[in-house]
Image: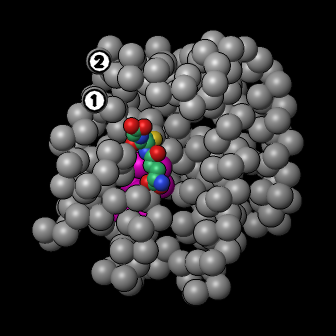
């Protein structure tokens, strides 16, 4: 299996939250993929997918893109160790995915946007600045002007997750599954490019993130990033 995976200036600094979900999902199933470093300005490399975003996977000659579609595909093709235990769990995970993207990605990006920009490959910087400033309606620096407020917003928004994590070790209960990977991707995005301390050590979400970093022989902890919570 091959997977196109977003890289920063260095090939081994992999930061995409959507790609991290899939790397954890593959490890969950004991599947291996060759990850190919990809950048914003390399759209032709994934032209086979008919769109311009990663993750994209190629498995047995079949192309699949979009992290949710890839998770569904993996559970269909490799049903052992499911990412979704039931149809009900999958529906709830879909709601959770939307919550992570609409409620958590924003404050995290406000906290790390300038570090993220600085970490990008030089070739990607003009594209990122132009496309994001158009989308945000302000400069990256204006958007990221108040990282402390971003942290407050993020930690407040994490309340529902925190309530779960004082009861059980994972979002999905006793063992991790796709909803954990959805949430963890957001933290791994920040860790790859920014020293900003997103969580305090007394936060149950912090302890969960430590467990997630250790999963699958430390897959996420071994990845290049900042040891901000050390
Ligand atoms: N809905 C997609 C979103 C993927 C996505 O936004 N990928 C970003 C990387 S984090 C991307 O490839 N962006 C390319 C661009 O903005 O041109 C998924 O879940 O896979």
For label 2, the SS is helix
Above or below residue 204? Residue 106 is: above
> Which image quarter holds the C terminus?
top right
- Residue 186: image x %, image y %? 58, 44
Residue lying at the far left in this picture: please name it: 61
Say if disc 2 is inside 8 Å of ligand 1: no
Tag 2 and tag 1, C-beta contact below 8 Å: yes
Main SS of residues in magenta: helix
Above or below residue 113? Residue 184 is: below
At 63% from the left edge and 24% from the top edge, which residue is drawn?
137
Find ligand 1 in the image and state its quadrant: top left
- Residue 218: image x %, image y %? 45, 47
Residue for badge 1: 41
Above or below residue 6? Residue 84 is: below
On residue 123, the disc is: 2
As measured in the structure, the alpha-carbon distance from the residue carrying label 2 to the one carrying label 1 is: 7 Å
Write down the quadrant of residue 161 in the picture. Answer: bottom right
- Residue 41: image x %, image y %? 28, 29
Write down the quadrant of residue 119 in the picture. Answer: top left
Q: Callout 1 environment at 10 Å: few (<14), some (14 to 19), or many (20+)?
A: some
């Amino acid at each position: 299996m091959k997977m196109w995976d977003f890289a920063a200036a260095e090939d081994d600094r992999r930061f995409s939250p959507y790609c991290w979900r899939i790397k954890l999902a593959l490890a969950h199933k004991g599947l291996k993929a060759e990850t190919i470093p990809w950048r914003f300005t390399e759209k032709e490399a994934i032209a086979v997918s008919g769109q311009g975003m990663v993750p994209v996977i190629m498995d047995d000659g079949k192309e699949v893109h979009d992290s949710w579609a890839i998770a569904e595909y993996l559970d269909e093709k490799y049903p052992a160790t499911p990412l979704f235990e039931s149809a009900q769990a999958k529906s709830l995970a879909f709601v959770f995915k939307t919550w992570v993207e609409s409620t958590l990605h924003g404050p995290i990006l406000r906290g790390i946007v300038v570090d993220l920009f600085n970490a990008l490959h030089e070739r990607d910087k003009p594209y990122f600045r132009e496309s994001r400033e158009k989308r945000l309606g302000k400069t990256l620096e204006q958007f990221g002007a108040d990282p402390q407020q971003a942290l407050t917003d993020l930690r407040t928004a994490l309340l529902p997750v925190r309530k779960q994590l004082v009861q059980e070790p994972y979002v999905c209960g006793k063992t991790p599954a796709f909803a954990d990977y959805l949430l963890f991707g957001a933290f791994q995005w920040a860790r790859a490019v920014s020293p900003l301390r997103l969580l305090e050590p007394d936060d149950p979400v912090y302890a969960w993130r430590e467990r997630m970093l250790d999963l699958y022989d430390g897959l996420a902890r071994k990845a290049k990033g900042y040891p901000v919570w050390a």
